[in-house]
Image (tube, grey):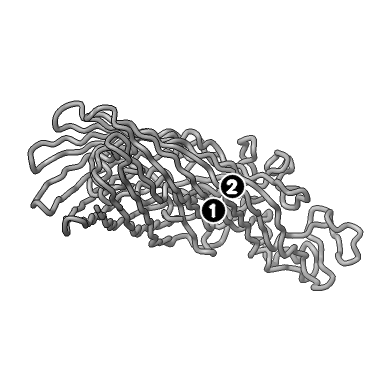
Amino acid sequence: MFKPSSIAVAIACLLHTGLAHAEGYKLYEQSVSSMGNAYAGRGAQISDASLVYSNPAALSQLKGPQWAGGLNIIDADTQYRDVAAANANGAAVIGRSSGKNSLIEAVPFAFFADELNDDVHYGFGFYVPFGLSSDYDHDWAGRYFADETAIQVLALQGSVSYELTPQWSIGLGLNLNHAEGTLSKYKDHNGLCETGSKINAIYQRDVYNAAYCDSHYEVSGDDVAAGYSLGLHGQPMSGLKLAIVYHSELKFTLQGDSVIRNTPITGANVAGSANYIVVAPQLPAIDKATGKLAAQSQLTEASQLALTTPANLMLSLDQQLTSDWSWQASVNWTGWSAFKNIEIVSVDAKPSLSLSTSQPQNLAKPGYIGYIPEYWRDSWSTALGLTWQYQPDLTLKTGVAYDENPISQSHKTARVPTADRLWWTVGANWTINRHWTLDLAYGYMWMSALSINEHEFNANDQRIYKSQLQASFKNHAQVLGMQLNYRY
């Protein structure tokens, strides 16, 4: 029985196992100008057109039409070691016990902002709010639990702000999001691969089929969902700017195909067929054409996965200390508790995979192809930043941030092996001329080592089989960002 995990965290392609500046698989890389301060003060600082996403209300403080566009390069790696895995029968899985997943990905964004009149400003943009990607070596010992995990969410947003008073403004953003993802793993057919040629003794002939060791499951799908952002920007006292921003949940139903190749054909499924020799109903039949154990080259079933990405609430401050120095602070809450489990369910009029996977001894719910309990927790992140106007045309920035891990120890998996993380960033803004400015930023992440002890469960959250995966992980990441801004 296989345990496909989410297309989402399964889920979540522009981020390697949640390693860019993020919580879970939520990305922050929509503004290099904010990245220099580790995103402290984001939405409170009056910077550039990236406020279309960071805080729609702050658009009221921008003067005239302007563009902002940039690119973040994420360099991340996950080292794994001490891998020990057991198949469904409890036998040891032979495979790579240590290795490294490495990834270099680009995360782009682009925004435009302008004013309709003195009170109303607007803008629109493109960005990547969520992403996740990892791909293990095909021969690693944990292949029955995880192979490839990839998701990307691309968003288009329009925002508008209204100035209530010279000090206070409110804003609204509406966004349209396209999510697509792929999840894969190798299939454990009750230890047939690990049994190997020893199975010949049961049949008393040479019937071993090596294709069972290349039985691979993959699910993919996509969907479109709408969301919104609410913002408040104000100056409660001289020199202090404040921002409160809320980004809504996004509810997707990812639809696509579940595909599995090289699955055993049991005697019960071909009883009475002249093309097979049936030894026992529960055992693989023998294919008369090859003389080997029978295998279905591929099965495909239409399926879907309900995925809710979390809401986020942010409070930011930007305090001017002197004419040259200012400090920034932010606190973020993310509602990861909405992510309770991953359910891959058949929507096919002619089911194939789910006929087996939904049986009482497997997932134990009609139509279920895959299930994994997640039960993530709401998380918090904090950031502090410092900005120095070094010269009239050059501003220097730095910041530190702490991101709380939303996954409890009992629910950590090989697909998202993550722990609490600490970030340090540096950045600069250079005024090239009256129209052009350039933002550069660099960030490095520290994360403590972690371990997982993963099992399989049915759709009633009851543990099934003797399969198990234990491993230790160490994660590192760094991000380099560049952003160009143009003011007319």
**Residue lying furthest bottom:** 290
Amino acid at circle 1:
Gly
Q: Which mark is residue 181?
A: 1
Q: Residue at x 53, y 39 (%)?
A: 251
Q: Foreground: 125 or 270? A: 125
Residue 243 position in % (x across, y down): 28, 33
Up-down relation of residue 160 to residue 132 (above or below):
above
Amino acid type assigned to the residue bearing label 2 in the image: Leu
Secondary structure of residue under mark 1: strand
* Residues under numbered marks 2 and 1 in contact, where contact means CB atoms less than 8 Å apart: yes
* First along the sequence among labels 2 and 1: 1
Question: Badge 2 is on which residue?
Answer: 254
Q: Is residue 302 above or below residue 170?
A: below
The number of numbered badges drawn on the structure is: 2
Left or right of 244 on screen, residue 289:
right
Residues packed near mark 2 inside 10 Å, few (<14), some (14 to 19) or many (20 plus)? many
The x, y position of residue 387, in whole percent, is: 15, 45
